[in-house]
Image (cartoon, rainbow, N blue to C red):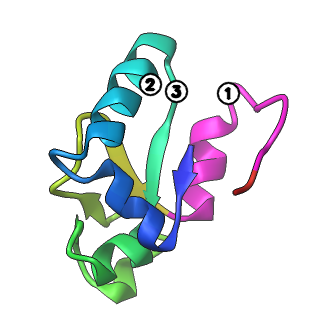
Amino acid sequence: MMFFDDNVYSLSTGNEIGQRLSIVAKKNNILLMICDQCALRRGMATGDFSQCGTGEVTAKNTVDGVVAGCFPQLYGALSANMPDQIITL
């Protein structure tokens, strides 16, 4: 699951929805990724904007199991097990 814009807040530490997603994701081997640039703008990542898309930005203040990244990191993470469907909200 990839989260963008203000949707990254749903994975912030202490968020009830994020806590439940974290448990389900761990149990079912589901990726939880927040957009690195979106997370930096909202104080939920460590790094700087020049690192966006490189994989060097790290998530902070999030529930367990969340990583920060951009499409290159998303595609890399999914390459071994491509999804059957993609749903955008």
Q: Is residue 53 left or right of residue 50?
A: right
Residue type of the residue flagged with mark 1: Ala
Q: Residue furthest top?
A: 27
User: Which one is in front, 50 or 20?
Assistant: 20
Residue that carries the numbered disc 3 in the rendered image? 30
Label 2 Cα crowd, 10 Å radius (few <14 / some 14-19 / many 20+): some
Question: Residue visible at 41% across and 69% down?
Answer: 36
The residue shown at (61%, 60%) is 72
Furthest-bottom residue in this view: 50
Is 76 in the magenta? yes
Mark sitting earlier along the chain (1/2): 2
Judge the density around disc 1: few (<14), some (14-19), many (≥20) Cα neighbours within 10 Å.
Answer: few
Instruction: Name the residue tied to disc 2.
Output: 25
Real-space Cα distance between discs 1 and 2?
17 Å
Q: Estimate the x, y position of residue 5 in percent, counting from the top left.
A: 48, 74
Task: Read off the magenta span.
Answer: 70-87
Quadrant of the snapshot with the N terminus:
top right
Residue drawn at x 50%, y 35% as measured from the top left: 31
With 43 as the anchor, is 31 left or right in this view?
right
Q: Secondary structure at mark 3?
A: loop
| Picture quadrant of residue 69 | bottom left
